[in-house]
């Protein structure tokens, strides 16, 4: 009788913390500031474009690289915001969200035993995707509360077997936006060690302080980078799962070599909608950022008003609250109690550390202002949970 159940190498990753906390949140009818998804939907005209495609087509498979219309819109996006030329026919792959992009890239590029350097705290699908592709994770560990990336921190994790570095800026969950000096470090590190750079840029339009720098805009990284993004965050359409990679033709060929067998292509009518989204006028992006700036202030101010010390994130829709000053040493248990006893869900960042040590907890502010107010009101009783 064959052994049934999850393969050994995936067992350490258990169930994604996002699913776990969302389930717990639903069970206790809590306000879910855990898993990052907006409680409002993306622009009407974008949804209308997808709906029209469902009604009138196209509804059949797209080419495996993605609908030409969307691939050209993606190339147009990089020209528009970063002044970078992208070849829509040889450098773009439309994927099942950015998570799909990560999976396809790992499967297409890694040989068994190749090492991938991850920066702590990482996004939860990174290590699991590396392992599913037969790779081995290595870790670089910048220190809190700044989480700055410097050369020494990266060097500590690299070996002759390292093939890839993964970065994420704006960074989930720390809210950091890497500055020019950090990008210089990343660039020279990748060049000196001859690494592929996987740059997860899904929060690219959520920058409150500083500017987003795309790996694609750095000539020395252009050919060795896989840049991934999606419409989920920027257009409040996380359930569409439309993402993409942009990479030089040989890397794109490798990604597509895997993508054709993991999913072949993604939902065609939603690709039509995604193309419409990427072409929205500047006014959409201005309003989008204005709304998020105000939600950021609201949540951070609210958390401070009840005696907590959230960081003011430079980017993303998350803020971190350090628990150590509160005398709490188990972030997971604390998040469970917050959900059960106060009715607010958050994410324990221990899930994003190699040794699983307790860390700050993450609150998402991609919610309506009245929901954020209600969450603060519930959290004001936090003293009840403190030792
Ligand atoms: N990116 C989202 C977050 O960080 C979660 C996405 C997911 O649950 N897979 O909260």
Image: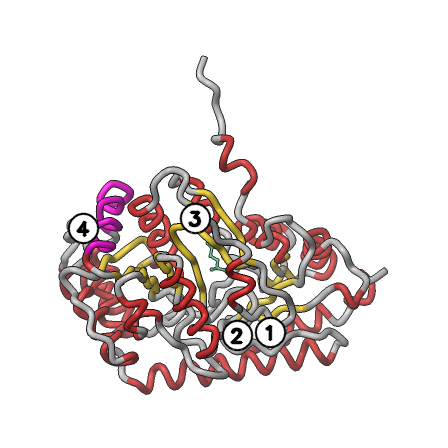
Which circle marks residue 372 in the picture? 1
Please report whichever mark, 3 or 1, sits nearer to the chain's N-terminal start: 3
In the picture of the structure, the residue carrying the numbered disc 3 is: 160
Please report whichever mark, 3 or 2, sits nearer to the chain's N-terminal start: 3
Nearer mark to the viewer, of 3 and 2: 3
Relative to 226, 12 lies left or right: right
In the picture of the structure, the residue carrying the numbered disc 4 is: 64
Q: Which residue is drawn at the image coordinates 33% and 74% (left, top)?
A: 43
Q: Which quadrant is home to the N terminus?
A: top left
CA gap, disc 3 and disc 4: 34 Å
Nearer mark to the viewer, of 4 and 1: 4
Which circle marks residue 368 in the picture? 2
Relative to 350, 86 lies left or right: left
**Is residue 290 covered in magenta?**
no
Q: Are marks 1 and 2 in contact (CB under 8 Å)?
A: yes
CA gap, disc 4 and disc 1: 41 Å
Relative to 235, 366 lies left or right: right
Disc 1 C-beta below 8 A from ligand 1? no
Q: Are marks 3 and 2 in contact (CB under 8 Å)?
A: no
């Amino acid at each position: 009788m064959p052994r049934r159940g999850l393969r050994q190498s995936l067992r350490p990753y258990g169930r994604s913390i996002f699913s776990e906390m969302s389930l717990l949140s639903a069970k206790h009818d809590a306000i879910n500031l855990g898993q990052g998804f907006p409680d409002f939907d993306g622009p009407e005209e974008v949804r209308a474009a997808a709906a029209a495609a469902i009604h009138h087509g196209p509804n059949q498979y797209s080419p495996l690289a993605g609908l030409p219309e969307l691939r050209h819109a993606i190339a147009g996006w990089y020209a528009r915001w970063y002044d970078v030329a992208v070849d829509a026919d040889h450098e773009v792959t439309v994927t099942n969200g950015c998570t799909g992009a990560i999976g396809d890239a790992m499967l297409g590029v890694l040989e068994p035993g190749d090492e991938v350097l991850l920066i702590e705290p990482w996004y939860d699908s990174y290590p699991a995707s590396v392992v599913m592709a037969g790779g081995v994770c290595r870790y670089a560990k910048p220190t809190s509360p700044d989480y700055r990336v410097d050369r020494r921190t990266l060097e500590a994790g690299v070996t002759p077997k390292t093939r890839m570095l993964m970065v994420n800026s704006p960074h989930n969950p720390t809210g950091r936006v890497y500055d020019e000096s950090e990008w210089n470090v990343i660039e020279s590190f990748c060049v000196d060690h001859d690494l592929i750079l996987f740059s997860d840029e899904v929060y690219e339009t959520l920058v409150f302080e500083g500017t987003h720098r795309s790996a694609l805009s750095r000539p020395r990284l252009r050919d060795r980078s896989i840049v991934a993004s999606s419409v989920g965050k920027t257009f409040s359409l996380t359930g569409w799962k439309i993402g993409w990679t942009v990479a030089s033709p040989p890397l794109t060929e490798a990604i597509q070599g895997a993508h054709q067998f993991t999913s072949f292509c993604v939902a065609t009518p939603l690709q039509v909608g995604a193309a419409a989204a990427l072409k929205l006028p500047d006014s959409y992006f201005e309003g989008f950022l204005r709304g998020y700036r105000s939600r950021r202030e609201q949540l951070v101010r609210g958390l401070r008003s009840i005696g907590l010390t959230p960081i003011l994130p430079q980017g993303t829709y998350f803020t971190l609250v350090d628990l150590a000053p509160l005398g709490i040493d188990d972030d997971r248990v604390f998040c469970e109690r917050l959900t059960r006893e106060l009715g607010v869900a958050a994410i324990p960042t221990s899930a994003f550390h190699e040794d699983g040590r307790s860390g700050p907890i993450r609150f998402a502010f991609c919610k309506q202002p009245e929901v954020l107010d209600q969450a603060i009101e519930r959290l004001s009783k936090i003293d009840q949970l403190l030792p």
